[in-house]
Image (cartoon, rainbow, N blue to C red):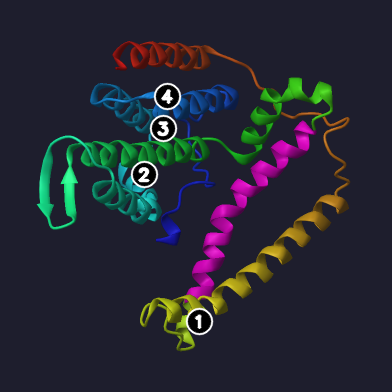
Amino acid sequence: MLQHIAIGQYVPGQSFLHRTDPRSKLLFVILFAALVFWANNAATYAVLVGIALAGILLSRLSLTYIVKSLRPVWLLILFTVVLHLLITKGGEVYFSWGWLSVEEMGVRQAVFISLRLTLLVLISSLLTLTTSPIDLTEGLERLLGPAGRIGVPVHEIALMMSIALRFIPTLMEETDKIIKAQTARGANLTEGSLVRRARSLMPIVIPLFISAFRRAEELALAMEARGYRGGAGRTRLRRLKWNWRDGCMAAAACALTFVIGWWRT
């Protein structure tokens, strides 16, 4: 499961999304996330699902790889569905057995909330899969540029977020290695009671923290050795420029907002 986490990874390519300015992609993802919570019926969610599928086509990434990237959140989605089915009440009763009942509002909320989680993870994965960490950092810094005039450390914030995203697949890979090493030494991580399983995670968590701190220290030393002093006086090898692809993204964002607002009940 750990090797299928797509958030934070970048897949080089020459697709429409790969060649789109990172600023337009960031703005579109932010708007899309807001619209996911604004949508409230089947028609609006169908439009959002269609946009997400169109994004997969424009990225030219394998659909199998994208679906596998959702595996880490399947458990969370399943838990959310069961929780709403059992707790949310209202409307027609579909199933009843003693205190346990499944009603219309519970099914509705379970479907909509699971769709929200899936769409948010999917659109975030598409952003990182089609945008290199350097472009993502620069795009975020350019978007937050006006805040720098009032003393906000824009460059440092953008760099911190970029490093955090970049370290997600690295830490997942390290976790996988530690689990395999502990299993090879006879550790049993999948059997026993819940308390026993929680205790068995200690041989994984402690080495993972030590490895994370060591990597952070090595990165800090490498940046200092190369003379990194923040964003002051830094030049850029590649300058971001808006083109017709970004115009298409802006038009799609406006159209999507209008359609969601029109069909929203």
Q: Residue at x 78, y 61 (%)?
A: 217
Circle 2: element type: helix
Q: CA distance from mark 2 to mark 3?
A: 11 Å
In the image, the segment drawn in magenta is 153-179
Residue 19 seen in render:
no
Q: Residues within 10 Å of mark 2 (few under 14, many from 20)?
A: some
Q: Secondary structure at mark 1?
A: helix
Vertical side of 264 occupied by 3: above or below: below
In this figure, which residue is indicated by the disc labeled 2?
66
Across and down, in percent, residue 22 comes to 58, 27
Mark earlier in primary sequence (4, 1): 4
Q: What residue is rendered at 83% in x and 57% in y?
A: 221
Q: Earlier in the sequence, mark 2 or mark 3?
A: 3
Q: Position of residue 133 (x, y in %)?
A: 62, 40
Q: Is residue 144 visible?
A: yes
Q: Nearer the viewer, mark 1 or mark 3?
A: 1
Q: Considering depth in this image, is 147 or 56 the residue closer to the camera?
A: 147
Nearer to us of marks 2 and 4 is 4
Residue at (41% x, 15% y) in the render: 257
Disc 1 residue crowd, few under 14, some 14–19, many 20+, Cα 10 Å: some
| Residue at mark 3 | 59
Mark 1 highlights which residue? 182
Amino acid type, residue under disc 1 in the picture: Gln
Residue occupying the point 87% across, 53% down:
225
Label 4 – label 3 distance at C-alpha: 21 Å
Task: Determine the CA span between mark 4 and mark 1.
Answer: 44 Å
Amino acid type of the residue that numbered disc 4 sits on in the rendered structure: Leu
